[in-house]
Image (tube, rainbow, N blue to C red):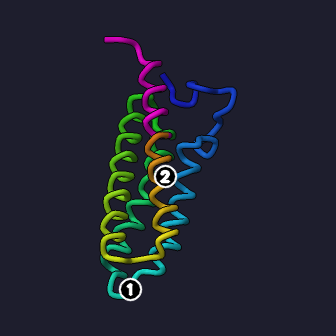
């Protein structure tokens, strides 16, 4: 089953997916947040958070462009993993006092929302697969 055929009425590209749009928003928030981190974190937590955030949306896009729903599901799993990394690293940043509290809270809220969107898309795609 081709991932694009799952919902051809509304989804013409990965850019139409809320599960891609919100991670882009999360990435922008993460970049703004990490710009507030100490300069000593440029190659530490800051870089790691940015890479993980970029990875979420990138995996959704790459999976959507693959040739099968099973491959799409695999990449959505990778996106979930990267979102988990972001969530964990935000907890660490908060504990270390890096970044403004309101920006950390916004990033954490978006991270939770992204997780829900990814889980919903995964559930939807799995429901369309034939039962073994």
Residue 45 figure quarter: bottom left
- Find numbered disc 2 in the image and state the secondary structure of the residue it sits on: helix
- The reply to whether dot 2 and dot 1 touch (C-beta < 8 Å) is no
User: Going 50% across and 71% down the picture, which residue do you hit?
Assistant: 31
Q: Residue at x 48, y 63 (%)?
A: 105
Number of numbered discs overlaid on the protein picture:
2
- Residue 129 location (% of width, % of height): 42, 18
- Membership of 5 in magenta stretch: no
Q: Which residues are magenta?
A: 117-132
Q: Position of residue 121 (x, y in %)?
A: 48, 33
Q: Which mark is residue 97?
A: none
Tag 1 residue: 38
Is 8 left, or right, of 30 in this rendering? right
Residue 127 picture quarter: top left
Residue at 42% over, 67% down:
50
Q: Residue 120 appears at what percent x and percent y?
A: 48, 33
> Camera-side residue: 6 or 106?
106
Helix, strand or loop for disc 1: loop
Foreground tag (2 vs 1): 1
Outermost residue, right direction?
9
31 or 61, nearer to the observer:
31
Looking at the magenta stretch, what is its main secondary structure? helix
Give above or below for 16 relative to 9. below
Q: Which residue is mark 2?
A: 57
Q: CA distance from mark 2 to mark 1?
A: 26 Å
Q: Earlier in the sequence, mark 2 or mark 1?
A: 1
Residue 2 sits above or below residue 21 on the image: above
Q: Which of the 4 quarters of the picture holds residue 123? A: top left
Residue at (53, 43) in percent of width and height = 19
Q: Local crowd at mark 2 within 10 Å, few (<14), some, or many (≥20)?
A: many
């Amino acid at each position: 089953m081709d991932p694009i055929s799952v919902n051809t009425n509304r989804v013409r590209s990965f850019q139409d997916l809320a599960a891609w749009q919100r991670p882009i928003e999360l990435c922008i928030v993460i970049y703004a947040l990490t710009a507030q981190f100490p300069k000593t974190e440029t190659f530490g937590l800051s870089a790691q958070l940015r890479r993980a955030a970029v990875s979420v949306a990138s995996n959704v896009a790459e999976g959507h462009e693959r040739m099968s729903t099973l491959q799409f599901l695999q990449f959505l799993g990778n996106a979930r993993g990267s979102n988990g990394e972001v969530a964990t690293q935000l907890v660490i940043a908060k504990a270390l006092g890096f970044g403004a509290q309101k920006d950390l809270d916004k990033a954490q809220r978006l991270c939770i929302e992204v997780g829900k969107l990814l889980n919903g898309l995964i559930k939807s795609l799995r429901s369309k697969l034939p039962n073994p």
